[in-house]
Image: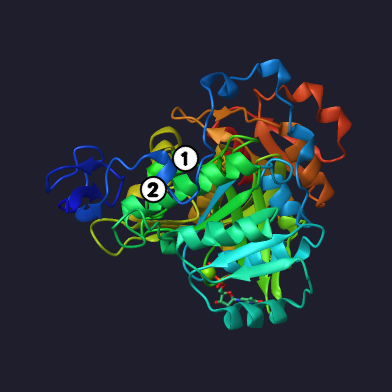
Amino acid sequence: MSKIKTAFFCQQCGYESAKWSGRCPSCGQWNTFVEEKIQKDIPLRNSSWKQPELSSAADNIVNLSEVSSTEDERLITGDAELNRVLGGGIVPGSLVLVGGEPGIGKSTLFLQNALQLSQITTLYISGEESAQQIKMRADRLKIQNDQFFLLTETSTQTIFQEIKKLRPQLVIVDSIQTLQSPFIEAAPGSISQIRETTAEMQRFAKETHTPVFLIGHITKDGAIAGPKILEHMVDTVLQFEGDQHYAYRILRTIKNRFGSTSELGIYEMTGYGLRQVTNPSEILISQREDQLSGVAIAATMEGMRPMLVEVQALVTQSVYGTPQRTATGFDLRRLQLLLAVLEKRGGFHFGVKDVFLNIAGGIRVEDPAIDLAVLCALLSSYEDTAIGSKICFAGEVGLSGEIRAVNRIEQRIAEAEKLGFDKIFISRYNKQGAHSGKFNIEVAPVGRVDEVYQQLF
Ligand code: TYD
Ligand code: MG
């Protein structure tokens, strides 16, 4: 009997090494190497999803012009948010990885979607919950579907045997960390198991044109556990995120071979499952009568969709020698950069102030067009003067204090107008002449930070 082979894997990035080392040479993290049992050099046909025997090599080569395009065969789900995030529905044979923190609602989202797809046979494979638990959840969602099948199993060999019997048109795996390939000795959730089981799922998806969703847990620092290697293997990576204290959940595209990566779906967790939020601006702007200082509204874009969000800032006299800077929903380094711009270009003394910044609604915004609103919220709190509640902003701020042009300005202006705003500040460089006449809303082009300041305060 041969000796069991082992290898060391970096649990952070998946780097494989024959020897243990304190620091991963690939990602530079410390203490991430774990020894895993592996059975190396297994021929492909030994994996749980068997490839058909190949008669001759020529059969594998196809002429590209003879390959049928599957573009129009996408499976459209009842969930418009999911369809958009996937780039217009589920692509046949695609492998989609969905990451998210525990308890955020991944299982709920996919159970709900699978139950709604009554026109196709769906197999939901759960290694985490019992059939009773899933039934209880389905009852809570109040959706009936007799084309929905459940399998509580973790061995990929058994899973593929069942799949061959049922022939489902959609497969959901909850979660990839629970799967176990009998050809690998390592424990479920280890790097080598995740890699092998994902590879088996990938071969299955590609050979049968069945779309497969893999649910995956993420580590504390937000990466999908069992890491980057997975991102290369799958077609699409989605991230389900949200603040535990808010009901809103965001489904974001991280990678997509079949669509744009900047798409976003917004849901609200209710007592009976996730509800699609079709007009996010209305919920992200708090409905208030009185005007408060430190609040500014940004006209941002998330993917193709305009969204108005509220930026809240609090600037106070610092008690300690080192002033505090905190940002929620916004990049802290970006905040520090904007403060430096205000200090240097505007002559404001933020160096002696504590600064707290928050994006309302518990969402995270990456669109640079939010800069101008962040800056105005900071100034508003600094001056303790409220900005009119019918004013919003869309512009990126450069290091020399210039307001830079942002993309899709017309959509942003149109959204602001639709939501009843009177005035929007944009960059002078956004060719405002071309569209200012089209809107009823007042479009105020500005070139520099001090111009905005003079017009507002
Ligand atoms: P779940 O889908 O189990 O999360 P994940 O699979 O990402 O770990 O969601 C769990 C949370 O969602 C749990 O805290 C309860 C809540 N929830 C609702 O608020 N309403 C519902 O209808 C359901 C099914 C769950
Ligand atoms: Mg779950």
Q: Where residue 432 sits in the image (x, y, percent)?
A: 74, 25
First in sequence: mark 1 vs mark 2: 2
Query: Residue 217 falls in which quadrant of the image?
Result: bottom left
Q: Any mark on residue 341, and which?
A: none
Give, as a three-letter code, the residue at label 1: Met
Compared with 450, 189 (above or below) is below
The secondary structure type at the circle numbered 1 is helix
Q: Any mark on residue 195, and which?
A: 2
Say which quadrant the N terminus sits in: bottom left
Query: Residue 74 falls in which quadrant of the image?
Result: top right
Protein image colouring: rainbow
Q: Where residue 215 sits in the image (x, y, percent)?
A: 52, 58
For disc 1, the marked residue is 233
The secondary structure type at the circle numbered 2 is helix
Q: Does residue 163 appear left or right of residue 416 in this picture? A: left
Point 67% across, 68% down: residue: 149
Query: Residue 109 falls in which quadrant of the image?
Result: bottom right
Judging depth in this view, the residue of 311 and 348 nearest the camera is 311
Q: Where residue 249 sits in the image (x, y, percent)?
A: 61, 62
Q: Does residue 282 appear left or right of residue 37 in this picture? A: right
Compared with 205, 104 (above or below) is below
Compared with 159, 24 (above or below) is above
Q: Where residue 409 sits in the image (x, y, percent)?
A: 71, 32
Give, as a three-letter code, the residue at label 2: Arg
Q: Does residue 18 appear left or right of residue 389 in this picture? A: left
Q: CA distance from mark 1 to mark 2?
A: 9 Å
